[in-house]
Image: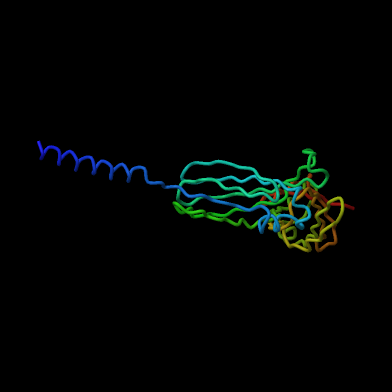
């Protein structure tokens, strides 16, 4: 009887040890402060912090989830340990923080974080409001010159927005040409002359460049007299 009791105790202790291993916590926390460097990079200055809202998207071993925060706030959440892709989108309202109609997608940031079990992992996400596009200049049906001559045209490229006209400069040939620019709404205009001094011009439809975008844009040019 005594031997049976000893065996029973050993089995019970082993079961407890195994159960302890099985319920071991394999999660960590992640925190992001939107009143610190993340918000300062996204916004012009901290006086505008109350006009910002942030959407945070987590994608990793535990699936995906999203959280929101306002400028000046912090978020803290629990994630499975491992590598997580974190995307932060910043939205700003320049008119009235309570007016949703003026909400503008202002900046984006992406990082990969290695979440350690049992730790609080503080993450800073660098933000950018830049975007890029590749333009291809396409000859219209009335452009009656050789391909060789068309490929040597020097094109003047211009972005037009309501308040300013940033000058991109001169590009040679039809492209594609990659241009890095700020996000926003734009029209693009291209103009050039061939060796016989014929003048060609084209413009794009309205282009929306969101932060982090890379778009391909075709602009058809025609001869102008």
- Residue 66 appears in which quarter of the rendering? top right
Give 140 or 40, whichever is nearer the viewer.
Answer: 40
**Side of 222 where 35 appears, left or right:** left
Give 47 or 157, whichever is nearer the viewer.
Answer: 47
Give 30 or 86, whichever is nearer the viewer.
Answer: 30
Q: Residue furthest front?
A: 2
Q: What residue do we see at 60% from left, 57% from top?
A: 124
Image spot of residue 165 (x, y percent): 84, 57
Image spot of residue 141 (x, y percent): 77, 46
Image spot of residue 3 (x, y percent): 10, 40
Give 107 or 208, whichever is nearer the viewer.
Answer: 107
Q: What residue do we see at 69% from left, 49% from top?
A: 90
Counting every numbered tag in the picture gives: 0
Q: Residue furthest top?
A: 1
Image spot of residue 178 (x, y percent): 68, 58
- Residue 93 appears in which quarter of the rendering? top right
**Side of 118 where 88 appears, left or right:** right
- Residue 164 appears in which quarter of the rendering? bottom right
Q: Specify the quadrant that holds the N terminus.
A: top left
């Amino acid at each position: 009887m005594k031997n049976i009791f000893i065996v029973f105790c050993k089995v019970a202790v082993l079961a407890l040890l195994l159960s302890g291993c099985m319920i071991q916590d394999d999660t960590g926390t992640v925190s992001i402060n939107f009143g610190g460097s993340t918000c300062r990079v996204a916004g012009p200055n901290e006086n505008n912090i109350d006009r910002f809202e942030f959407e945070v998207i987590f994608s990793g071993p535990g699936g995906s989830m999203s959280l929101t925060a306002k400028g000046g706030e912090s978020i803290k959440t629990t994630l499975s340990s491992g590598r997580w892709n974190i995307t932060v989108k910043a939205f700003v309202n320049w008119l009235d923080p309570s007016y949703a109609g003026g909400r503008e997608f202002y900046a984006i940031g992406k990082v990969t974080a290695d979440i350690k079990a049992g730790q609080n992992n503080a993450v800073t996400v660098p933000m950018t409001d830049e975007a890029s596009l590749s333009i291809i200049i396409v000859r219209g049906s009335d452009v009656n010159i050789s391909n060789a001559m068309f490929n040597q045209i020097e094109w003047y490229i211009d972005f037009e927005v309501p308040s300013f006209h940033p000058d991109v400069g001169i590009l040679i040939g039809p492209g594609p040409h990659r241009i890095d620019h700020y996000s926003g709404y734009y029209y693009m205009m291209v103009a050039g002359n061939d060796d016989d001094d014929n003048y060609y011009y084209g413009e794009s439809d309205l282009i929306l460049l969101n932060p982090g975008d890379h778009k391909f844009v075709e602009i058809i040019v025609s001869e102008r007299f």
